[in-house]
Amino acid sequence: MPSYTSFGPACDKCNRLDTSNMTWEDGMKNFFSTYFASSRMGPLGYILNNPYSPLYVERALPSHNWRDAFEDLLAIDLTGKMINTEDRAAEDVVAARNRYDDASQAIQLLNYTIQKNEELKKFALESRNVAVDNRDDGAVARIDNAILPELKALRENHISEGIKCKEEYDKDMAATATSLKTRGQWITSLINSGALPGWRWTVRNSVDGPTVYIRRKHAPPELDAAVAMSELELNEHFEKGQPYNFDSPQPLPEEKLQMLVKNPPPAPDPAIGGSLLRKFWPSPSSILCQDVETEPVQLANGSPGVKVIIQNRLLNGKVATKEIVRQPGKVLEEIESARRSMRYVRDFTRSGGNPDSVGQSDLVLYS
């Protein structure tokens, strides 16, 4: 009789897992379970794959803030103290402002889209009058039975999206900054706060959205470790049980990025998001990727702290570096700004360089 491991039948001779008849999906789960459970991955492996990870538990028991509790455990293990409540309050202020800006911009974009819809309706009605005068019954029928109903449905859909936007905003205003972070953002925020030392991270643009690369910092070969996964992949894993995969998402097309550098779109109409859109409008100075690492420092009061070093790599080849000490709200602001800048670049490249599409992903709330 063969023996069994937690993954399936084991080899009789060596008691190791027999992978000869394993499905691809089970093989992937086995590989990543082994890799994430290794000592070199530390708490990061636990977060990504353990069934008691806060990213799993929060789905079953959403009434408790499991993320903050887990971060506090990490901090206590390192320093004997939990995360400072003032630090979290500073993040909450920034998160509230960001959500207001996002909701305001989304509603402005919806209003602009509704306005364009009304202009199309006006043109359709004028065309109908011409068709009636010309006794073109076919054109009148197309306008009455296809064009006008479609424009009405679009308008109703946009109004529905506006109501949804307001509801989402009201709900988010009662949430903490921690709970509003995407899964990738929360994992990297543990590095930023100093709760997960010895790691550095990068967020890059890809066709699937933001992709996070996390790697050991200055580790010897026997302890080196790294993971890379998009926010989409993290969502698929924790929400649908999809296995992680080896392949990184495809980067944005280089030719379209170069188009943005050489022929940036004109500045947005103030009526379309106003200064909110203008602030992150795709241009040669848009952010291509963001590199972040931390260093331990001693604060003025003698207590240990963390210096966060942020490098924004821009489309024009330049690098903007910022160093932030004991300002978690400022760190969150820099990270949110980078992600928004990268999102607008994605919109631009996906559309083939159509500036009207920039910011349209905001209509899917907080994408």
Image: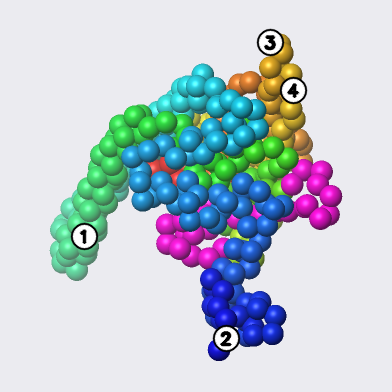
> Which residue: 74% across, 23% down?
297
Q: Is residue 314 above or below residue 82?
A: below
Name the residue furthest top.
301
Rate crowding at label 3 as few (under 14), some (14 to 19) or many (20 or more) other CA atoms within 10 Å: few
Residue 252 placement (x, y as % from top left): 63, 55
Q: Residues within 10 Å of mark 2 (few under 14, many from 20)?
A: few
Label 4, label 2: how far apart the Cα atoms are:
55 Å
Give the extent of the magenta segment: 216-244
Residue with the mark numbered 3: 301
Label 1 sits on residue:
143
* Residue at screen point 69% across, 26% down: 306
- 163 lies left or right of 31: left
Residue that mark 2 sits on:
2
* Mark earlier in primary sequence (4, 2): 2
Does 253 sit above or below residue 121? below
Query: Is residue 96 placed above or below 4 in the rendered structure?
Result: above
> Where is residue 224 shown, x and y percent of the image?
77, 52
- The part of the image, by quadrant, that contains residue 197 is top right
Q: Which element is circle 2 on?
A: loop
Q: In terms of sequence position, does the residue under pointer 2 or pointer 3 come before the other?
A: 2
**Of the residues shown, which amino acid type is indicated by label 3?**
Asn
Q: Position of residue 309 (x, y in %)?
A: 72, 31
Magenta-colored stretch includes residue 238: yes
Q: Nearer the viewer, mark 2 or mark 3?
A: 2
Q: CA distance from mark 1 to mark 2?
A: 72 Å
From this viewpoint, which residue is outermost toward the right?
220
- For the residues carrying marks 1 and 4, which lies nearer the camera in this image? 4
List the single residue furthest toward the bottom.
1
Q: In the depicted view, which residue is nearer to us: 25 or 72?
A: 72
* The N terminus - image quarter: bottom right
